[in-house]
Image (cartoon, rainbow, N blue to C red):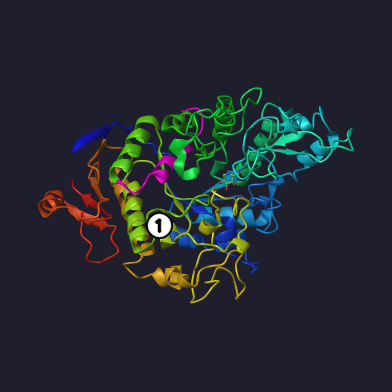
Amino acid sequence: MAETVAGTAASSSTPWWLHAVCYQVYVRSFADSDGDGVGDLPGITSRLPYLRDLGVDALWITPFYVSPQKDAGYDVSDYCDVDPLFGALADADALLERAHELGLRVIVDLVPNHTSSEHPWFVDALAAGPGSPERDRYLFRPGRIGADGVEGPPNNWISRFEGPAWTRVPTDPERPDGPGEWYLHLFDTSQPDLNWHNPDVPAMFDGVLRFWLDRGVDGIRIDVAHGLFKADGLPDQTLAPGESADPGESLITQRPSHTPMWNQPEVHEVYRGWHKLLDSYPGERMAIAEAWVRDPGDIADFVRPDELQQAFNFHWLAAPFSASAFRGVIEQTLAAVPAPTWVLGNHDVVRAVTRYGGGPVGVERWRATFLTMLALPGSAYLYQGAELGLPQVDVPPELRQDPRANVPGRGGRDGCRVPIPWSGAAPPYGFGPGDGQPWLPQPSSWAELSVEAQTGDDSSTLEFVRRALAVRHDLLSELAGVEPELHVSGTEDELVIRRGPLVCHLNTGSEPIAAEHRDRLLAGATVLLCSGSDPKARPGDANTATWLHRP
Ligand code: NOJ
């Protein structure tokens, strides 16, 4: 087994986020306090003890701001207030206070790439017409005349959801009889992209950041962090042979090489400013970038010492269940990123249990991969319901809500957003009070996956996650803030991580490792935890990860 040794910085003052386990709360689907079928802030507050007992350090809450909900809250019309669907500002304050009482940090979402088309700025921009200061806050352009003499979009960019990234406004004030200018939206037509070169835009977001930091949030998740600036002149995108403009989230390494709409250098100046702003607050406030960039090295740019503290590591999420693939991502990440994160799921991608093959095997593989990522230095992000082993749900087309739900080839995201089963034998499984059904239907098979059903069952995924987080917590205390060298070795199907006294062994093959190999692995070591759900699972079994303590 060839071995890689990763140099890691030793430090005695570790900021809370560096090794934190952060639980992603998808607000619509976590807990519903008022029985309208949609999760809300008081629902989250009522379940905070569950998160504390699970053993996570922090929660990240997806957008709960005022929004027409065209893209489940990622279309914001007022950044400094709570949508009545989710509660009121007082509920946000109560949530923060209770979380802090329980020792949990809170990260909130910020959506700076675009507003809702119902944001007052966009309403004003439509009314004000071409060339106005109001329009300059967005990216309005005249159309381009094609070879056929017909006016089309200003360039060839496509939206991440459906069709061209441009929509033509029905009329402009000075052209009441004809179609008007086009505006850019890299996502839904209801999410116009902002013009970050216009000084009003950074000024507004400084204010939004201060608004939530003043209320006590510990961190900010930056939506589409690599998108704020577009290449000068908005040039066409050119694709190399075989490249697709939108290969999909899980094919991150196949993103096109020429992306005039993503990852422009100007964005880093914004994050240098936000770094200073976060630093001006007491406590260790942080920000994490959502940046789907092709190369791990590009992630590193977002986490330079004077920029953001973290960026999601989507390369880990996109890797197949393969020891050698995981090893490659670990090596590339640690070589490039000083404060790494490990992510296996979120509200935009197919749930990992299903990505890894589904059924009992998918669950075993998720457990093994989760245990492996918990062994790595850095911070782990856990998407709600993953701790229950929830699979992707095949939501019937007529019930889907995602704006890209029925776009061929794009894959709707409703299937990973189905509300959490808390208790009981039938939907809504304690998601809300009474029998009212949630905004997306829960499968009838989920009774056995509920929090109630899994609690106290040692073989359950929930109890496994609780044990894993508790053991990790103890290990971090043993390391006492001094990060040992990391050794990563392996073969096609086997990965071994050594981090001080911890040895993590992962077998992604279809056969257990040989008996003598197992004996060598176990010699002088204590088994701390094995990911297998079968009480008879042994270190080195197929689809299994094991933590060993070797002082
Ligand atoms: C990323 C978010 O995670 C996703 O849900 C949303 O649709 C897009 N950004 C647009 O805001």
Q: Which residue is mark 1?
A: 353
Q: Residue 303, position in %: x, y? A: 47, 32
Q: Magenta residues, as a range? A: 303-322
Residue 206 lies within the magenta run: no
- State the residue at coordinates (52%, 58%): 415
Residue 320 lies within the magenta run: yes
Principal SS element in the magenta part? Answer: loop
Up/down of 37 relative to 316, above or below: below
- Residue closest to the eye, 458 or 42: 458
Direction top: furthest residue = 232
Q: Quadrant of the N terminus?
A: top left
Q: Quadrant of residue 400?
A: bottom right
Q: Residue 28, position in %: x, y? A: 59, 58
- Residue closest to the eye, 147 or 546: 147
Mark 1 CB near ligand 1 (8 Å cut): no
- State the residue at coordinates (31%, 46%): 322
Quarter, ligand 1: top right
Please indicate, yes or no, whether residue 543 appears anywhere in the rendered image.
Answer: yes
Q: Residue 302, position in %: x, y? A: 49, 31
Amino acid residing under circle 1: Val
Up/down of 37 relative to 237, above or below: below
Q: Secondary structure at mark 1?
A: helix
Q: Residue 435, position in %: x, y? A: 60, 76
Direction front: furthest residue = 148
Q: Quadrant of residue 279?
A: top right
- State the residue at coordinates (71%, 46%): 78
